[in-house]
Image: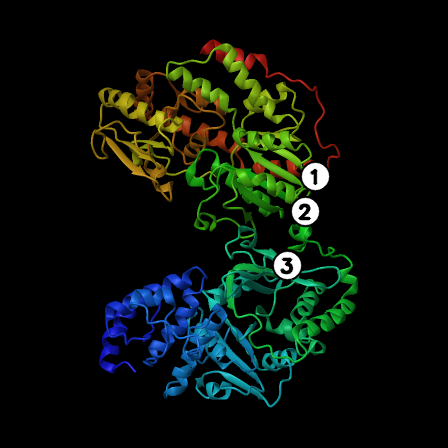
Amino acid sequence: MVPRSTARKVVPALRRFSWRLLVRGPRVLTSPRRMWHLSRAFTRHFRNLGLRGALGRTLRFLVGTRAVIVEIAPPPAIAEIIAPPPPPVPEEAPPSPFAVPASWAQCYTHFAHLALDALLAGPASLDFAKTDAPTVSIVMVLHDRAELTLACLTSLRASPYQDFEVILVDNGSTDATAQLLGRLDGVKVVRNRENRGYPAAVNQGAELARGKYLVLLNNDTQLLGDCLGMAERYLTAHAEVGAVGGRIILLNGSLQEAGSIIWRDGAAAGYGRGNQPEDPTCTYLRDVDFCSAVFLMTPREMFLGLGGMDERFTPGYYEDADYCLRLWQCGWRVAYHPQVTVLHYESASSKDTQGPQTLISRNKAYFAEKHAWWLANRYTADPERLPWARTVASAPARILFIDDRLPNPCLGSGFPRARRILDELTDLGYFVTFYPLQVPDEKLLATQDLSSGIEVLNGYGPERLGSLLRERRDYYDIILLSRPHNMRVLRGLLAEEPDLLGNTRVLYDAEAIYCLREAQQARLTGRPLTKDELHRRLQAEFALVDGCWGVIAVSRLEAEHFREYGCERVYLLGHAVELEPGPDSIAERSGLLFVGVSHVPDSPNADSIRWLVGNILPRIQRQAREPITLTLAGRCCEGVLPPGTRSGREGLRVLGAQDDLRPVYEKARVFVAPTRFAAGIPLKLCEAAAHGVPIVATSLLARQLGWHPETHLLTADTAEEFAAQCVRLYQDHDLWRHLRTNALRAVQADFDSTSFSDTVQTMLRDALEMTDIVPSGPPERQAPPHIWARHADAA
């Protein structure tokens, strides 16, 4: 044993790490530095398996009892860190009884035994808070494996959610379970002299439950994070759900299941088994055939009303699938929630002499007979049908949405509109797979504010799009693809494999005619495109729509261009903007405001900022009779602002990214948008007008919106004129009110959220109901000549 004095020195140091265990290998570890290295080594050793938090709780309990267990030899990698390797053991020597187990399951059990021995060796007890009206009642059935039961109970005590009671039903255990139960306070215990089987024991515990919700929990599990709270809040918010289960992770760090499937012959399969827990196909919320009773939360009254578990499945297997199917047959949903995460030591407490396969075969036959009519409508067991079978079909259609990256509205560049489309799709009940094609590796944190029912295929990228479409051929009813460079990726795949999409229809969301913006930018840089080059680029971009079922345009002007090209189905879908006008008194407002995100130095917003700060602002300050401050709001990359420019000097204020722009809009008197090249619709103007801020912009933006100068906004295309218009609007109170009123009316008429929703609903309904797959039209179409001619003349 390590002396108490040494323990008092080492324990505080170990508390800084997740592994709090005092270990003595072949040599006595009395150095805190050695203990530090050991802690780090154990952390690295288990981190890859996802067991850090779970095992850490067991080890923290061990240290918390001040029991110092010392007869453990560290693995070779750890021993090398602690001290030089010991001399080799002679071959004839018997194996050490203290050798570290070879498998992770054995290692996990070993640590669990340490914690159990530590508890039973002293006078300590495990206390649970007593409550008269718990929200959740946790029912655990025990049959030996007291060490795993203690690990599970320890994880319950560590759970952030504590509004629960614990009911333990001991099915004739013969190990240290009786001693462990004697050390528990605040729990209900049912002792059966013999093993009554799992279904009967669950029913016993449910009869004693007082909570609104019942949790069926295996004793060989550990709860990770706030899974109890997640499940309880989900059931409370969704009264139509009869049960919710979670992501079950095995000790080797792989998935046991992410919801489960029942095939037509009655066979059950855990979806995602063997995959990584972070597999994006397993991390979205969906309705499933059933979730196993490793962790299953269900309303208590519902459980009792259905008669509880069917005891004809005794001693176990298929009783949880049977219960979930009875919920479905009564009109209740069964949901898989990926944030409900549980670590599971699979089959740890199963000691049935018949063997699990015999029990499974017997109960499967009874299950198939009992639910024959329901199973007749299920899929035949086939790995290729997993995408179809993984969820209970309730959505009117399945849609694959392809865009550059996760649609964070703060990014600008059309992503606010993409986000609104995505929200509309989920509100209409469609199942959506979102495929970030160009930026595929964003962290899951970026998806937290998306609907949890969206499958986000992070990490796939361009290289896996073909294989996904091949594996899910005819799975999706519609592919909604945004932006021309993404369409080029799809067309490249179709060139190699023309039948890749099967009967899936493609809706192309052009988002903008990009080559027009490129022509404007080339003209500004002094390298204008020739007429032939502009014509070639326009032709190539318009040709992307060939073979698409329909096209979505963002503005009336661009919609007309696509119709002139020969597209039969063109849908106009701009932006959805809510009116939030601030103070209508010009006296309550001051300063100029520019809002925009600059991802790269050559973007339209970056050019606007440079022109505004370097050329327009000095002219405004010379012409104005009063000091005027310009505020720049939005994320700005390096190299955009002129050298030496700093916030607070020369009438300039740089805010950077803002979570909420409303306070900024409410203080601004004039909104400025000196954009010299752009395509699509300028959302920034719509939002400024919706917040009641009159606008000075270039004539380009006015044309894109279809708004009239002197009626909805002021326009100018040179630095001198732009500065003069800003000063004029800033000082003319009557003009300010006139433009504000008309712009608010224009936003309400052109960017109404109800009209946006109706358009999304209409185009999807058309795509699903119309019988022809590819629109008819001439095989060779030309870009409308007046488009390239007009821009070529300007160049």
Mark 3 or 1: in front is: 3
Q: Is residue 553 left or right of residue 98?
A: right
What residue is disc 1 on? Answer: 768
Decide: few, some or many residues near mark 3? Use Cα within 10 Å; few <14, some 14-19, many ≥20: many
Three-letter code for the amino acid on which mark 2 is drawn: Pro
Q: Which residue is mark 3?
A: 288
What percent of the width, then of the height, locates residue 582?
38, 39
The residue labelled by disc 2 is: 396
Disc 1 is placed on an element classified as: helix
Mark closer to the chain start, 3 or 1? 3
**Spot occupied by residue 62 in the image (x, y as percentages of width and height):** 37, 77
* Circle 2: element type: loop
Give the position of the C terminus as an image quadrant: top left
**Quadrant of the image for the N terminus?**
bottom left
Compared with 493, 136 (above or below) is: below
Q: Of marks 2 and 1, which one's residue comes earlier in the chain?
A: 2
Q: Residue furthest top?
A: 793
Instruction: Tell me the element at label 3.
Output: loop
